[in-house]
Amino acid sequence: DTHHERILVTGGCGFIGSALVRRLVGRDGRRVANIDKLTYAGDIANVAAIASDPHYVFHQVDINDLGAVTSVFEKFRPDGVVHLAAESHVDRSIDSPETFVWTNVLGTFNMLHAAHAYWRNLPAGEAERFRFLHVSTDEVYGSLGTTGLFSEETPYRPNSPYSASKAASDHLARAWHSTYQLPVIVTNCSNNYGPYQFPEKLIPTMIIAGLEGKDLPVYGAGENVRDWLFVEDHADALCCVLSRGRPGETYNIGGRAERRNIDLVRDICSLLDTSLCESLHLPHEKLIRFVADRPGHDLRYAIDDSKIRNQLGWSPSKTLSSGLKQTVAWYLENRSWWMRHREQRYDGGRLGLSVFA
Ligand code: NAD
Ligand code: TDX
């Protein structure tokens, strides 16, 4: 194991980044510098629990700003980078792809460029310990049919502007290792869920709409399948890859928890039924509406995660049913958090369109 003590996290005010920051700060003496632009998706409240810890520092910085990023490298002198800053919502990428290319592709280039300039001047021992962990998604592999799994060898076939921009960034990360020997590692993870997920994503959309007695908008016939991983298990996997992963390698991360969207939405409805006995909306299933499908909607994602399990010894701690229960409870207890973000919930024009209802 390589112990990293000074970790630069990008996108640490987002959903997954904040789970990682909350986990890292102060643990075993670790220091964290968090750089985040604070777009609509970033919220400093997500890291309030550790914000005044002396092991933590925040810089409101755009990863496209080379001068600002370089100065954080020089001042903080990290021995590891975990790069999560990105535009992350597929529906937004369909309607306005520019910022996805800007942040995900050019921003990742900028991070690699700054990291390389810093790393090449480190003394030999420190240079060897340094890692640049680029956090990516299983969506780069495209869509599966009803069988099969994505492995680390599956060819890239991204279908949305979001996944295409992530695929491009993964290729840049790989090239910086092959060409410049920068110690880069790439992870490709399946769908995350849990506390602090922005209200535009499937699970918080359904919980919040259910709590408010509004329509639950299921795209198409709800037959698309996703593999779900609790966000804290993803943060744990990232820590594991940072300390044990081999530079130049890719690791798939998954939850072995495939679910059709419609079944997942029904699971959420029954959790809401039992949590809100006095609700006017019982049973919540009656709020389900089938709406216009997402263009280019990938049918199924599923991960073969045997490499990270066998080589690095990681496995998730939560099942989908225990994680979902905890997530519904969190949204019930943190109304003021999601009420603040609800206005920026994304309606790409599809949500109002009932096609089967
Ligand atoms: P998120 O949208 O919740 O958070 C993204 C964060 O990045 C925000 O805090 C935002 O302010 C910041 N950011 C955006 N543009 C920036 C810029 N130009 N400069 C600096 N900061 C910027 O996203 P998330 O769901 O936490 O995803 C984090 C990463 O993990 C992304 O790279 C995403 O592709 C990847 N990923 C996500 C999932 C998932 O299910 N959510 C699964 C696999 C991989
Ligand atoms: O209102 C909705 N209704 C609906 O049926 C929303 C928001 C989504 N969906 C469907 C579309 C997908 O099949 O639910 C599924 C999940 O949708 P999202 O939450 O938007 O996630 P997805 O498109 O699968 O992408 C997510 O996982 C991989 C993250 O947003 C990405 O950042 C990550 O890389």
Image (cartoon, grey):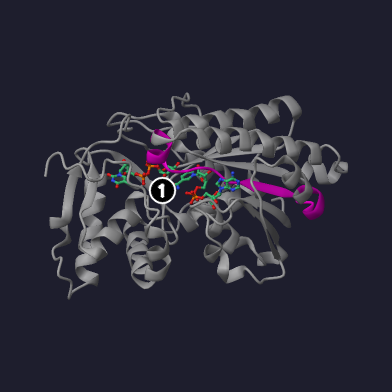
* 62 or 124, nearer to the observer: 62
Left or right position of 117 against 176: right
User: From the viewer's perspective, is 303 left or right of 169?
Assistant: left
- Picture coordinates of residue 219, whole percent (x, y): 24, 41
228 lies above or below 96? below
Could you tell me which residue is drawn at 19 percent across and 39 percent down? 221
The residue segment tinted magenta is 73-94
Disc 1 marks which residue? 255
Indicate the amino acid at tag 1.
Answer: Gly
Q: Residue at x 22, y 45 (%)?
A: 352
- Relative vertical location of residue 356 with respect to residue 198 in this rendering, above or below: above
Magenta includes 75?
A: yes
Taking depth in this image into account, of 234 and 350 the one nearest to the observer is 350
Rendered residue at 19%/67% (across/down): 273
**On the image, which quarter does residue 297 sit in?**
top left
The reply to whether the magenta stretch includes residue 116 is no
Residue 244 horizontal/vertical position (percent): 64, 47
